Image (spheres, grey):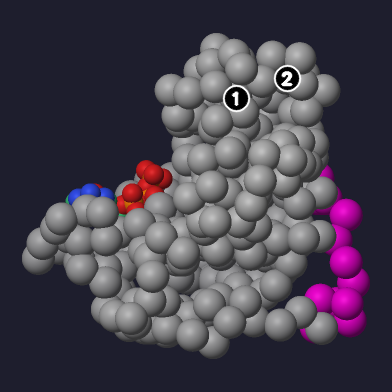
Amino acid sequence: MNTMQVSFGEKKDNAAQAEHAVKMSARDVKVFYGDNEALHGINMDILENEVIAFIGPSGCGKSTFLRCLNRMNDTIDTARVTGLVTLDGKDIYDRSLDVVQLRAQVGMVFQKPNPFPKSIFENIAYGPRLHGLVDNKRDLDEVVESSLRRAGLWDEVKDRLEAPGTGLSGGQQQRLCIARAIAVSPEVILMDEPCSALDPIATSIIEELIDELKGSYTIAIVTHNMQQAARVSDKTAFFHLGNLVELNDTREIFTNPQDSRTEDYITGRFG
Ligand SMILES: Nc1ncnc2c1ncn2[C@@H]1O[C@H](COP(=O)(O)OP(=O)(O)OP(=O)(O)O)[C@@H](O)[C@H]1O
């Protein structure tokens, strides 16, 4: 088989991976946009403190599935989700669930950095205030600093916290958005092509950050860049035409895919 040349990030051995608990799971998840069934019954377990990459050709449903994991599809009028999605075993589509709280627990970083039109400080402070996570200004300052530090941005912005977030470079804005997600103590971070608007240097900074963050968070990332999937993820899920074709250790997916559609995709025969 003619697989592509990719370099892999350092991964834990299988014994260590086996200890990871299931953080989120999907059972027979379908998504309809009006009458169009875009996802045809996805089953997936996402393990705690792992990075899972979603890959596949354009329009195969990667972003649609990602959005099921924190109910972002609720914001699309025509979208309807069926099946079961759980976080720590609890149904996230339960009517009694607080969606604002869910989106703090399962944070999201988008393709295009989207800081609020506010200061760098306020971009981070907004969430902890909204969720009542801080009692006073000192705690708030601490959360802002620690979130910016974790996102690897503190040193670059500590002297201009009152400057607008939108004035930062694209890569800095994306790290600001990651810091904003971190500030409300998420358990899972969803990333929808977080580097596609960034140059290679900013991309590699974000990739290093993802590697550091996975010690504390579970991360699901949609990417078109297979090299990136290989570098940052422990598991890779290959989607095709609204189906989950194959999910396995990233190394297996790229060196020994079981399904011919996966092989065709990773060898560049389609997509
Ligand atoms: N808001 C929407 N309204 C109607 N149809 C949609 C909407 N969003 C996605 N779709 C359709 O659902 C299917 C899956 O799209 P989705 O964006 O999830 O795929 P994707 O794999 O993330 O694609 P890409 O890699 O191009 O971002 C496509 O047929 C798409 O046209």
Q: Give the labeled residue for mark 1.
A: 120
Badge 2 or badge 1: first in the primary sequence? 1
Q: Give the labeled residue for mark 2.
A: 157
Which segment is the magenta one?
1-18
Query: From the viewer's perspective, is 176 left or right of 206?
Result: left
Question: The disc labelled 2 sits on which kind of residue?
Answer: Val
Q: Quadrant of residue 71?
A: bottom left
Q: Is residue 50 visible?
A: yes
Q: Report the Cα–Cα distance between label 2 and label 1.
A: 8 Å
Q: In front: 92, or 31?
A: 92
Q: Do the residues labelled 2 and 1 touch (CB within 8 Å)?
A: yes
In the image, residue 243 above or below residue 233: below
Callout 1: few (<14), some (14-19), or many (20+) C-alpha neighbours within 10 Å?
A: many
| Residue at image coords 72%, 46% | 139
Q: Can residue 256 be seen in this view?
A: no
Q: In front: 61, or 26?
A: 26
| Residue at image coords 54%, 87% | 89
Q: Where is residue 140 in the image (x, y as percent from the top left)?
A: 67, 42
Q: Position of residue 197 (x, y in %)?
A: 52, 26
Q: In which quarter of the image is residue 138?
A: top right
Callout 2: few (<14), some (14-19), or many (20+) C-alpha neighbours within 10 Å?
A: some
Question: The disc labelled 1 sits on which kind of residue?
Answer: Ile
| Residue at image coords 64%, 64% | 187
